[in-house]
Image: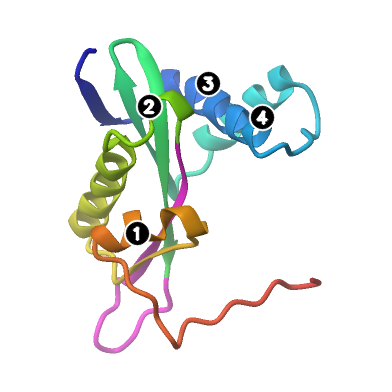
Amino acid sequence: MSEIQIRRATETDLPAAAELRWQWLLELDQRPQGSREDYVAYLTTWARSAPGHECFLAARGDAVIGMAWLAITDRVPSAAAFDRRSGDLQSVYVLAAERHHGVGGQLVHAVVTRAAELGLEHLTVHARALAIDLYQRHGFAMQPRLMLLKPGG
């Protein structure tokens, strides 16, 4: 097995990230809205025009095997800090055959490192039950004051 490389996605990598997102949908037995080709084209176009999002990829050789996204949000300036931003770790996914070998942890580490480089005030993640331990190993903790509302739901 070749070594895993973790890197920020380039524009030419975006279709591979979209393919992973499509694979994840199928793995969850969810019904796609359209064709695979339409989705890959849509996500690729979206990602190129989403300046507040950064995609990180895990690759083994030329094969992209995992991804994680950092969504960066501007926050209202305070008198103590004019430039305020926070982040959200999103869409962490590793192909089933590559799981349990530390790939997800490497992706999370890359996003956490980038968040620190950017000086983000905090980084959140909406974790599936099976991934809670992974995030806690990287310093995430449950917060009793964090609240969630699903508008219209």
- The residue at which mark 2 appears reads as 98
Label located before the other in sequence (1 or 2):
2
Callouts 2 and 4 close, C-beta under 8 Å:
no
Q: CA distance from mark 3 to mark 4?
A: 9 Å
Secondary structure category for the residue under label 4: helix
Report the residue at 33% width, 10% height from top. 62
For residue 15, which numbered disc appears in the image? 3
Reading the chain from its start, which is encountered first: label 1 or label 3?
3
- Residue 24, how many percent across, how many down? 58, 34
Find residue 11 and report its image quarter: top left
Point out the frontmost of discs 3 and 2. Answer: 2
- Residue range in magenta is 75-93
**10 Å neighbourhood of mark 1: few (<14), some, or many (≥20)?**
some
Identity of the residue drawn at 29% across and 77% down: 82
Residue 78 image position (x, y, % from top left) = 34, 85
Check disc 3 and give the amino acid type: Pro
Q: Label 1: which residue?
A: 133
Residue appearing at x 72%, y 36% in the figure: 29
